[in-house]
């Protein structure tokens, strides 16, 4: 191989975080969508197709991964080993892998230990051998020090379009429209509200907030201060 330049790829779900990470930090990255047979796959694929149609340099590659989607935990919406599967899938297309982890995420498969470990797995598996020059992988998480509200602010400040943002999908339900009652919809609502962007949902996200005692979690130390402040600001904006 003569080409020493590593290709940048980004794990893309059609969601807010991966799109903002692409727009703000690396617009040369190819968006890699890994189909793991999850229940909202159609919605995500449609979002990526819409973004690709609207934004000339937004390129998407679809990869078929292991069909682990049905292993999803119904209560939390977590699919075990999801991010390992996505990163291994994306590694087929580039060695600089952007992973849209943001601030205050608590899933262990988004933690710094996980990121270092999966980078090690890739680099050990792809070591130089007598039959190959080997590959060196890097997992990049430039959005890690920002929350969704900050990232949307940065996006808008860089000239990002609200219409493009609205093409993204952040919802764990298989409904056509954003359901408004899953954790993902609630987080999106918070960030949109804090940036004065309207967000149409099937159900009022405040019902989700009450059902899951979100205000209590903001005040009793369950959430980090940053996360609590982000959520409380949205709730206050909503009450105005
Ligand atoms: Zn939802």
Image (tube, rainbow, N blue to C red):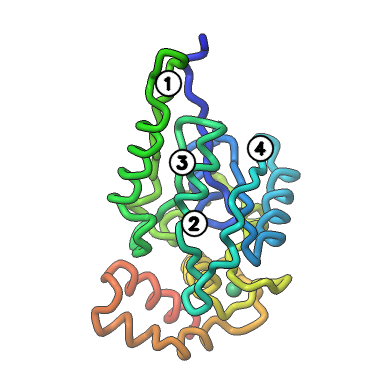
N-terminal of the two: label 2 or label 4? Answer: 4
Residue 131 point in image, percent of width and height:
46, 14
Q: Secondary structure at mark 1?
A: loop
Separation of disc 3 and disc 1 at Cα? 20 Å
Contact flag, marks 3 and 1 (Cβ < 8 Å): no
State whether residue 22 is above or below residue 76. Answer: above
Q: Which comes sooner in the sequence, label 2 or label 3? A: 2
User: Circle 1: is it few (<14), some (14-19), or many (20+) Cα within 10 Å?
Assistant: some
Residue under circle 1? 134
Q: Which residue is mark 4?
A: 59
> How far, Cα to Cα, is label 2 from label 1?
26 Å
**Mark 2 or 1, nearer chain start:** 2
Residue at the spot 70% in from the left edge and 43% down from the top edge: 52
Q: Mark 2 sits on what residue? A: 82
CA–CA distance between discs 3 and 4? Answer: 14 Å
- According to the image, label 3 marks what residue? 98
Q: Residue at x 32, y 55 (%)?
A: 111
Ligand 1 occupies quarter: bottom right
Front-most of 118 and 231? Answer: 118
Of the image marks 3 and 1, the number of the one nearer the N terminus:
3
């Amino acid at each position: 191989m003569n080409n020493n330049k590593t290709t940048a790829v980004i794990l893309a779900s059609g969601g807010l975080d991966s799109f903002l990470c692409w727009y703000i930090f690396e617009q040369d990255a190819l968006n890699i969508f890994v189909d793991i047979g999850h229940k909202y796959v159609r919605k995500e694929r449609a979002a990526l197709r819409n973004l690709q149609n609207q934004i000339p340099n937004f390129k998407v590659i679809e990869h078929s991964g292991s069909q682990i989607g049905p292993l999803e935990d119904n209560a939390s919406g977590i699919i075990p080993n999801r991010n390992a599967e996505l990163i291994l899938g994306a590694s087929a297309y580039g060695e600089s892998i952007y992973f849209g982890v943001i601030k205050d995420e608590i899933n262990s498969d988004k933690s710094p230990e996980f990121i270092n470990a999966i980078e090690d797995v890739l680099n050990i598996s792809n070591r130089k051998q007598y039959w190959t020059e080997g590959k060196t992988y890097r997992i990049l998480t430039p959005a890690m020090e920002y929350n969704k509200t900050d990232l949307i602010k940065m996006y808008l400040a860089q000239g990002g379009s609200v219409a493009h943002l609205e093409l993204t999908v952040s919802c764990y339900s298989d409904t056509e429209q954003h359901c408004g009652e899953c954790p993902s919809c609630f987080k999106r609502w918070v960030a949109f509200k804090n940036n004065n962007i309207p967000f149409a949902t099937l159900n009022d996200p405040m019902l989700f907030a009450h059902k899951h005692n979100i205000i209590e979690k903001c005040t009793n130390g369950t959430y980090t201060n940053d996360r609590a402040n982000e959520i409380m600001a949205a709730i206050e904006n909503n009450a105005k």
